[in-house]
Amino acid sequence: MRAQDLAQLSTRAFKTNPMRTWLTILGMGVGTGAVVVLVGLGFGLQEIILEQIVFGETLLSLGVSATGAQNLQLTSQTVIEFEENEHVLDAAPLARFPALVTYKGLTGNLFVQGVEPPYIRYAGVIAANGEVFGDEDMDNTNEIMLSPAVLKLFGIEDDEITNFIGEKVKFRLLVPADDGSDQIDEIFIDKEYSVKGITKEAGVLNALMMLPELRNHVGIEEYERIQVRVDTNEFLPIVENELIEAGYRVTALSKTVEQATKIFQGVQVVLATFGGIALLVSAIGMFNTMTVTLLERTKEIGIMRTIGAAPIDIKWLFVSESIVVGFLGGISGIIMGVGLGTVINLMLNFAASQFGGESVNLFAFPLNFLVFIALFSAGVGYLTGIFPAKRAATLNPLDAIRYE
Amino acid sequence: MAKPLIVCRDLDIIYNKGKSNEFKALQGASTDIYEGEYIILFGASGSGKSTLMYSIQGSLPPGNGTMLIEGEDIYALPIEDRVYFQRYVMGIIFQQFNLIPSLTVLDNVALPMIFANKDKATRNRRAQSLLDRFGVGHVSHKITPMLSGGQQQRVSVARSMINDPRILLADEPTGNLDSVSTQQVMDKIDEINTFDRRTVIMVSHNAAHLSYAHRVYYLKDGVIVREVVNPQRKQIKPVKEGETIVTELEQLARLFPYDSIDTLRVKSLVNLLTQDYTFDQIERMERVVEFFIMGKIDKEAFIRTLMMPYERGGVGIPEREARRMSKVSARILHQADDIRRFRKQNDKQNAFFDQHKLSERLRDHLLKAHSLKLSKKQDNNLVEIIADRVVGVSNEDIFHERMENGISTGGLALTESESDDLARYFEKLIAQGVDVSYKT
């Protein structure tokens, strides 16, 4: 039988029994729709988390700090040593001093961190408000970034944060005296810095300043932390091990991401299981329909067999019908699932914009996943069709033709 | 000598073998069917005639025996290869038409070609031309449930011929058709046999169809009880001289298809004892009488045909006898008209007077035909008796009984033989004059 004839013959049910056919498709659709929505929720959640932390360079960076145990210090020399490693592209240091910050007469404690622009990239610092330091800011001597907690310190409400950009603050650095005593020198920086942006670091009181500017006011001998940028992903664990063996403490964001991904894969499995149950129910329903269709068509099968249809023709008629039904079920499921997810996203975003929150996409539907679902449901169709089809093919034509 | 197209040897077919409802549908059936033959498998229901046909068709594997089609043992082939025969060698039509209701007429006819991988243009062209040939080309785009039975059967004849098979199998093709459609379908099948030279194997229990066939296989209880050659058709199967001779029994078999060979022998002898005429003459006489009753020929033509020698298409009856026959027939037909009028009046339920008059006339006919003279009282009684019989109040037995009854009790007091003659004659009138419609 030719493919187009097969298609025509096996889609007759849409004409002869449209109600039942479409209901079957709808049944399959609801099942696959459930899978699409639930797995889409998994993807959405994962993306929400990863969006916050994943940047290409951030993932390829290692945060190195001294353990203190082996008298290791992070100095300018260390930075150079790190950069000499053949798999290391760059190393960016962070220097940190406790300081007092003053804003409109209010004073509080925080840490002033001096970094170079690459560090910002490697560490994945992003701005919740205002702007983040870029490469052109190397010589920026007038601006700083603050962590959100600092604003709380000054009693700035959430809805006033945007107004805070451009405000002026002053610092007094608290530096240990270089005479070896426990005394702390207070270095007063007699200039006002304007706030360039607010970071997303939660729970810490930090101010970010360009390292050269910090150096203008205080001598830096030791760094708190160095971000090492590894050239490619595959060398990440190698470099990490080398550093750990050298006695440093190393944190890798990629690890965190990996763990997050693993967790979300687990979440997705759970969600997909629930969806899968729905899909199973609808597949059983479809199987049932195919069996009923077989009974209904028994006579027709007998007729076709006696006028020259081969058993394999009969089998293909049934299989292709169920593949078509399964595939259309999958497509309608995708439409329903994606539709529902999008509507929920829109509602959440609308609600978020009403209450001043940040817009999020709770559901995400990667194209690969949707293609997979469409093929998968065609596969489910094939499986539900194959057994009735085999039975139809092996029916004795005479028994079939006399079946009423 | 040509080889037979279909050879079936010692075929046993048992349904539900080994179960409590085991049923031997066919036992030891052997047939040779030659290319171009018209074969009828004849028998009552349950005789195994359809079983034999479907076994030829390839759907009923035999328990024992072989089935050769074109010299190939089809049941030795795997099922996928057997499809070849169903697709290209045989076409089939059914009593129930078995068209697929969700397809158009054209697609139904083209369906076997779809399975044979033919492209759409080719098969539509061929299907349409076949539909045109069988007189249903104008409905090719309708769906089949919209067609009459006769149309559906002609569509299925077209379907059976689409792949140009050598054999046409027909399973009681006229069983669901009215007489007009039956004639059309039978003519088409005959045309396929005589014009297209296709082998036709038809299952039937209708004796009227037997004259189409070259040979008839009679089946009873799963056994082929006899094979009868139709002497009116030139045989295709090579007949060895002296092996089969055409006897009167073959002729009788067509007249009395359900009787056993022994009954036919009895009939043959009884015919000799009771009748002056042969079965051939009787058969021909029946046709002439039919024409006469239908009014297609007049009395003179009737006499001439009866008198004409048998070899020239007549019945071959002596003139005196022929004239007597025509006189009696004409009289009975004429008087039967009075019965008809009487019944018509009866339907209207009025004009009793007319009925009485008609009854009197019938009485006079009857007495005249039998040269009887009755008393006035007897005359009146006879009018009553006739009226009751024609209306249907009394049956033949009561009619007969009243003839013999005493005059005072409303009878005629005739002798038994007089009553017999009168009753018999009057029943002939009633048979001609009463419209028989089996309405409930």
Image (cartoon, rainbow, N blue to C red):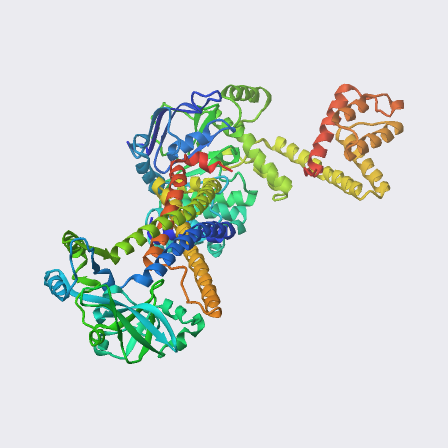
Task: Using residue A362 as the reference point, say whether residue A207 is left or right of it.
Answer: left
**From where the camera sits, is residue B126 visible?**
no
Q: Is residue B367 left or right of residue B240?
A: right
Image vertical order of residue B409 relative to residue B307, above or below: above
Q: Position of residue A73 (x, y in %)?
A: 16, 60
Which quarter of the picture shows residue B410?
A: top right
Q: In x, y percent, where is residue B14?
A: 42, 24
Q: Height in image: B42 above or below A37?
A: above
Q: Is residue A114 above or below residue A260?
A: below
Q: Position of residue A260 (x, y in %)?
A: 32, 54
Is any atom of residue A47 visible in this view?
yes
Q: Looking at this view, is B140 or B195 the one in front?
A: B140
* Residue for point 37% across, 24% down: B63
- Left or right relative to A296: residue A51: left
Residue B19, image x, y percentages: 45, 21
In the foreground, A349 or B168: A349
Q: Nearer the viewer, residue B28 or B315?
A: B28
The residue shown at (83%, 27%) is: B373
- How many numbered marks have been drawn onto this rendered protein structure? 0
